Amino acid sequence: MPRVEVREDESLERALRRFKRKLEREGILKELKAKKHYEKPSERKRREMRSARSRIARG
């Protein structure tokens, strides 16, 4: 679990922004959203193939 220590003379909002950025960089939010609902194996395969196609198209 990522940790962010609130520095001296730092607002809570700024520390919260750093924490959210850290979560995003580690891919935790993306993983959480993916596991929110069950995805059938066929749907997962279809989604992965679609993303692979778009990755190849971008070059």
Image (spheres, grey):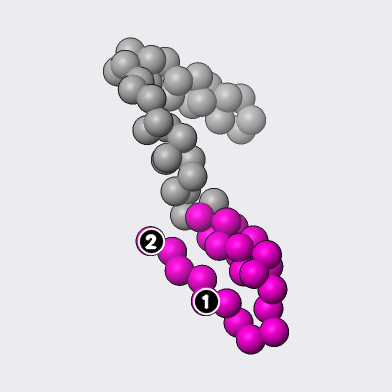
Residue at 61%, 33% in the rendered image: 59
Work out whether 4 lies above or below 25.
below
Residue at 57%, 56% in the rendered image: 20
Label 1 Cα crowd, 10 Å radius (few <14 / some 14-19 / many 20+): few
Image quarter for residue 49?
top left
Extent of the magenta region: 1-23
Q: Are marks 2 and 1 in contact (CB under 8 Å)?
A: no
Q: At label 1, which amino acid type do we have?
A: Glu
- Is residue 25 visible in the rendered image? The answer is no
Label 2 Cα crowd, 10 Å radius (few <14 / some 14-19 / many 20+): few
- Is residue 1 visible in the rendered image? The answer is yes
The x and y percentages for residue 35 are 37, 33
Q: Is residue 23 left or right of residue 18?
A: left
Q: Residue pushed farthest bottom? A: 8
Pick the front one: 22 or 6: 6
Q: Number of numbered discs present?
A: 2
The secondary element bearing badge 1 is classed as: loop
The x and y percentages for residue 47 are 45, 20
Pick the front one: 18 or 40: 18
Image quarter for residue 8?
bottom right
The secondary element bearing badge 2 is classed as: loop
Residue at the disc numbered 2 = 1
Residue at 42%, 40% in the rendered image: 32
The x and y percentages for residue 27 are 47, 48
Residue at 43%, 64% in the rendered image: 2
Residue at the disc numbered 1 = 5
Residue at mark 2 to residue at mark 1: CA–CA distance: 13 Å
